[in-house]
Image (tube, rainbow, N blue to C red):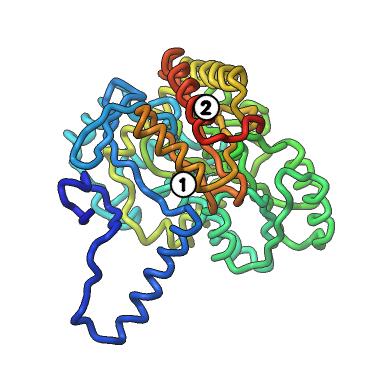
Amino acid sequence: MAVGSDKSGGNTQATNVAPLGHNEPPYRRMYNKAVSDALAAVRSEGRYRVFADIKRNLGDFPNARYFKDGETHDITVWCSNDYLSMGQHAVVVEAMHKAIDDVGAGSGGTRNISGTTHYHVELERELADLHQKEAALLFTSGFISNDATLSTLAKILPGCVMISDEMNHASMIDGIRRGGGPKRIFRHNDMDELEGILASVPLETPKIIAFESVYSMDGDFAPIAKICDLAEKYNALTYMDEVHGVGLYGPNGGGVGERDKVMDRVDIIEGTLAKAFGVMGGYIAATSELIDVVRSYASGFIFTTSLSPVLVAGILASVRHLKSSSRERDALHERADALKAALTKADLPVMPSPSHIVPILVGDPVLCKQVTDKLLDEFGIYVQPINYPTVPKGTERLRLTPGPFHSDEKIAELVSALETIWIDLKLRRAA
Ligand SMILES: *Cc1c(COP(=O)(O)O)cnc(C)c1O
């Protein structure tokens, strides 16, 4: 399949493009070999990633078109992080149309050099208010907000010990690593081990506990109040990734922190604008001074063009809508419960998850990919396999993300397809 040919359907993965070549200078061989060895390694571990080439249908979520071998197939998406389909909500789409007609496509600069539009200013106020903090700061993605903030805090707090849950997202791990300071890792949600680490660091040494409110691959919650108790006892700051909580929990969509009434106890809340809010971007919310220092020092904030005002207008509409409407959230949680019940009834290995995320254990990367290939090719159901390094080896899984528009019929279709595949591939039933 050649890159960009009709057959590839525009997909970007080259599977067997001819090597550049016979008349290349010999020194190139070592570079070519390193590249192909690295690719061979991911392939041999069964975790070579193939992106499904799709187009979502506006107003018809979760239906989409799938492009393969020059043909188009109708599919149902079961793995979107646009949890509430706000990315297709009329208020969001309209706000974006309006903005593009008002100011055009791009922001035209970094935040410092002509790229702070009034949309950005309004959105930062809105996000600060959502989390009941003094201020908020926008980034071009949630990944960058974690990476930029944690690495900056490590630099302005010399000697600060970063204390990180072992299941933290790659963006936090990268930020902590780039910060270059000391770090300690505690077993997932293990408060005894966290306390042991805190107690082993002198009280006067700065420390930051970094964790997530909802862990996106297992769907479990952090004991936020307990983490805050420990932080207070041992003079630590708290940094919470609410990426899978914002928009989905709490009466205003402020996240699990809002639901559990502990938002005010968490020092820095980080979120995405790409998942429940359905658009793109990331942010942190904290005290004015803390926001000011990240704004002033974080290169991942400073040296990049700000988000398009068109996106920001859409986000603003989405955040405001979910602040006042719980309909979408309530529907999502009801659908997640219905899906879990149906899977459990069919004796499929649903991993226990108290949240809206529904993981099904396969436990092998090759089988996991076979399951999802069959779902897509034979049943028109799109679920991306979740393999290492996103999850630990041996816990490869399907990760289902039901939304308000996954009907009972869609659930029945999915469960019946999974039952057939589970029998075909002789997979384990119990989680
Ligand atoms: C997706 C994700 C991010 C990154 O957010 P983006 O806006 O997609 O860059 C950060 N943390 C967690 C836990 C995530 O799942």
**Residue at 33% from the left image edge and 41% from the top image edge:** 52
State the image quarter where residue 27 is shown: bottom left
The image shows residue 30, relative to residue 248, as above or below, that is below
Work out whether residue 17 or residue 182 is closer to the camera in this orientation and state it: 17
Q: Which residue is mark 1?
A: 142
**Residue at 77% from the left image edge and 38% from the top image edge:** 226
Q: Are marks 2 and 1 in contact (CB under 8 Å)?
A: no
Badge 1 amino acid: Gly
Q: Secondary structure at mark 2?
A: loop
The quadrant of the picture occupied by the C terminus is top right
Q: Position of residue 284 (x, y in %)?
A: 51, 45
Work out whether residue 270 or residue 109 is closer to the camera in this orientation and state it: 270
Q: Position of residue 85 (x, y in %)?
A: 38, 26
Residues packed near mark 2 inside 10 Å, few (<14), some (14 to 19) or many (20 plus) = many
State the image quarter where residue 105 is shown: top left
Residues packed near mark 1 inside 10 Å, few (<14), some (14 to 19) or many (20 plus) = many
Ligand 1 near label 1 (Cβ, under 8 Å)? yes
Q: Which residue is mark 2?
A: 248
**Residue at 41% from the left image edge and 18% from the top image edge:** 405
Say how many tags the image has. 2
Badge 2 amino acid: Leu
Residue 286 seen in this snapshot: no
